[in-house]
Image: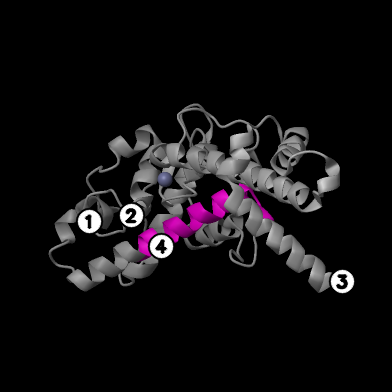
């Protein structure tokens, strides 16, 4: 039984091709073929069976990809990611079976025919799981699952499986053009979301800076008494300049409503505590 080679293109850049499959961007016929239903049989197999096989294939593949990526994330702060820490022996409450164990079980079901090649090296080249005797033709879901595991193992053996990421914003998979370096601090974002991610970071920073300024101004405002012999606004300006950086008097004027609100909150807080 020989299947037509659908994977010539796929071999070229395995991480990129895998990301495409994970994102559901493959043609339907290609997905069915990957999930173990060859094109020449597809008319004989009921639609529901084909759908179930494709679903099982994608589910298994996604789970492995997620687990692989999660193995490099800081469990306390998933936006901190170290791709070179990723490994196949890691497991967690969500991913209870290490990938390595999944692969061992796979090998138990499908012993690889290792043979010496012409150079005397042990090789499993040219082995196609689809053609393997160990594949059960009666169980399309198990077939789909094992094909997904096999597909993922090829990805792990590829040039740089550390280049695969899942976008923290849109959940799409993407592949870095170069090998990643060191630690990623604030989540990985695909090209489309990268701009958005950066904007979000800057906005957060600005808000915190403004929060700090408003709080300092409100603190100074409520401390003020006529005995300070200085205008109340000028007093608040001084405090903000001292603790947060240069501002004009009109900054206080512009934000007076917000500052007075905080002054009230400070008063309420004092009354409650006192
Ligand atoms: Zn994205």
Looking at the picture, how far across and down is residue 262, in whole percent?
67, 57
- Observer-nearest residue: 205 or 21? 205
Q: Residue, x 46% and y 43% (percent of image)?
A: 155
Mark 3 or mark 4, whichever is nearer to me: 3
Q: CA distance from mark 3 to mark 1?
A: 78 Å
- Disc number placed over residue 130 in the picture, else none: 2
**Is the residue 92 above or below the residue 187 in the image?**
below
Could you tell which of marks 3 and 1 lies nearer the N-terminus? 1
Q: Residue furthest left?
A: 43
Could you tell which of marks 1 and 4 lies nearer the N-terminus? 1
Q: CA distance from mark 2 to mark 1?
A: 9 Å
Ligand 1 within 8 Å of the CB at mark 1: no
Could you tell which of marks 3 and 4 lies nearer the N-terminus? 4
Could you tell which of marks 3 and 2 lies nearer the N-terminus? 2
Mark 1 or mark 4, whichever is nearer to me: 4
The reply to whether the C-beta atoms of the residues labelled 3 and 4 are less than 8 Å apart is no
- Disc number placed over residue 59 in the picture, else none: 4
| Residue under pointer 3 | 274
The reply to whether the C-beta atoms of the residues labelled 2 and 1 are less than 8 Å apart is yes
């Amino acid at each position: 039984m020989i299947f037509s080679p659908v994977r010539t293109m796929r071999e070229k850049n395995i991480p990129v091709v895998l990301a495409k499959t994970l994102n559901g961007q493959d043609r339907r016929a290609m997905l069915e073929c990957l999930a173990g239903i060859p094109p020449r049989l597809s008319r004989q197999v009921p639609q529901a069976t084909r759908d179930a096989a494709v679903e099982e294939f994608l589910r298994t593949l996604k789970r492995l990809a997620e687990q692989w990526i999660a193995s490099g994330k800081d469990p306390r702060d998933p936006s901190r990611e170290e791709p070179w820490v990723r490994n196949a022996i890691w497991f967690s409450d969500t991913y209870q079976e290490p990938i390595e164990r999944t692969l061992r079980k796979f090998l138990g079901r499908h012993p690889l025919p290792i043979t010496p090649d012409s150079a005397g090296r042990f090789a499993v080249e040219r082995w196609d799981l689809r053609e393997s005797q160990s594949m059960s033709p009666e169980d399309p879901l198990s077939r789909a699952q094992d094909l997904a595991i096999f597909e993922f193992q090829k990805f792990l053996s590829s040039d740089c499986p550390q280049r695969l990421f899942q976008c923290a914003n849109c959940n799409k998979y993407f592949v870095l053009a170069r090998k990643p370096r060191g630690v990623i601090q604030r989540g990985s974002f695909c090209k489309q979301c990268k701009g958005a991610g950066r904007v979000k970071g800057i906005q957060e920073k600005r808000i915190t800076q403004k929060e700090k300024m408003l709080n300092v101004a409100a603190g100074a405002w409520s401390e003020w008494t006529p005995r300070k012999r200085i205008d109340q606004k000028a007093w608040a300006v001084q405090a903000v300049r001292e603790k947060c950086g240069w501002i004009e008097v009109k900054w206080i004027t512009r934000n007076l409503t917000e500052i007075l609100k905080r002054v009230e909150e400070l008063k309420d807080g004092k009354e409650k505590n006192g």
